[in-house]
Amino acid sequence: MSYTLKLYSEFENEIEKFLKLYFNEDFNLENKYYWKKDFESPVDIIDMISVFADNKEKFKANMWISLDKDVYIDISENNINSLIKYIYERFPY
């Protein structure tokens, strides 16, 4: 099973700016308003959602993750800590 992270924005280049910060390299996305990445382990998602939450005010974008098929969770300041704890408890490897 794979675990999915999606970024959405109504503003051009906001996702590219975030990805440049996270990966420390330039991005030139074909779709400037949407980006999706699948992960083999949900624990691998934690770094990316942490960086997103820490820098949320710098980007006009939204992040959603899926830990179960067709169920998406919006990443926000209100749920980030609980979500990280939940991922480590549910997937303790």
Image (cartoon, rainbow, N blue to C red):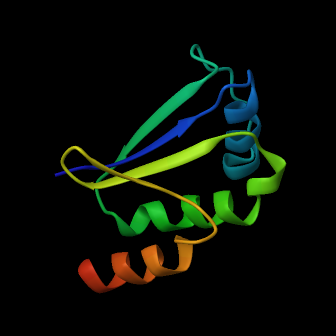
Closest to the observer: 7 or 44? Answer: 7
Closest to the observer: 23 or 89? Answer: 89
Q: Is residue 88 above or below residue 11?
A: below
Q: Is residue 93 visible?
A: no
Place residue 17 in its image quadrant.
top right
**Position of residue 78 measured from the top left corner of the image (x, y, whole percent):** 59, 71
Q: Is residue 52 visible?
A: yes
Place residue 67 in its image quadrant.
bottom left
Q: Is residue 20 above or below residue 47?
A: above
Give the quadrant of the C terminus.
bottom left
Residue drawn 42% across the image and 63% down it? 44
Position of residue 70 in the picture relative to residue 38 (left or right): left
**Position of residue 72 measured from the top left corner of the image (x, y, whole percent):** 34, 50
Position of residue 36 in the picture relative to residue 60 (left or right): left
Q: Residue furthest front?
A: 78
Position of residue 18 in the picture relative to residue 75 (left or right): right
**Position of residue 16 measured from the top left corner of the image (x, y, whole percent):** 70, 32
